[in-house]
Image (cartoon, rainbow, N blue to C red):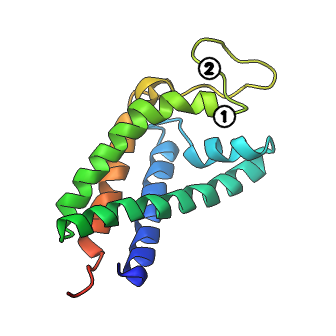
Amino acid sequence: MNWTSSLLWGFVSTIVLTTLMAGSQGMRLTRMNLPYMLGTIFTANRDRANVIGFGVHVMMGWLFSLFYIAAFHAWDRATWWLGASIGLVHAAFVLTAGMRLLPGMHPRMASEQQGPTVMRQLEPPGFLALNYGYQTPISVVVAHLAFGAILGAFYTLPAR
């Protein structure tokens, strides 16, 4: 494995994904703020939640980039379209399974079956994260396509 390339492009692709998601929220295409959602798992303080969640999201992006890179090694090639293909599968998993599992793991998120309480005030994302806006799945897919495409285009497989 080319550790320098994997750390660099894993970080860059994660920052691009996070920027695209934040931009889509800022442009009101979605109400989903994944770093905030992740941060509120660890703290009820809203300001700290954004900072903690951003750090968790970057670390998770780096970790997920290793799965993409493992696939590139298994295929013995890394291309933008292979990375984007993995990104599409990744986005589909996040939207269908991941978002449905989140309320069960999150101490401050209401569930689909039981509404908000004093402790569980965050709205659950629902299937395809549609509770955060009908354009949310589009922004998630585009961000993950970009993540994978950047990683596939710029990751350098070690010479044999």
Q: Residue at x 31, y 59 (%)?
A: 148
Residue 111's label in the rendered image is 2
Q: Give neighbour class at mark 1: few <14, some 14-19, many 20+ (Cα, 10 Å).
A: some
Q: Secondary structure at mark 1?
A: loop
Q: Quadrant of residue 5?
A: bottom left
Task: State left or right for residue 31 relative to residue 2.
Answer: right
| Residue 51 on image: x %, y % | 69, 57
| Percent position of residue 47, x then y | 76, 50
Q: Position of residue 60 (x, y in %)?
A: 53, 57
Q: Secondary structure at mark 2?
A: loop
Residue 43 visible within the image: yes
Q: Quadrant of residue 89?
A: top left
Q: Nearer the viewer, residue 136 or 152?
A: 152
Quadrant of image for the N terminus = bottom left
Q: Amino acid at mark 1?
A: His
Number of marks in the image?
Answer: 2
Q: CA distance from mark 1 to mark 2?
A: 9 Å
Residue 132 appears in the figure: no
Viewer-closest of 112 and 22: 112
> As drawn, is 44 to the left or to the right of 62?
right
The residue tagged 1 is 106
Q: Amino acid at mark 2?
A: Ser
- Label located before the other in sequence (1 or 2): 1
Locate the C terminus by quadrant: bottom left
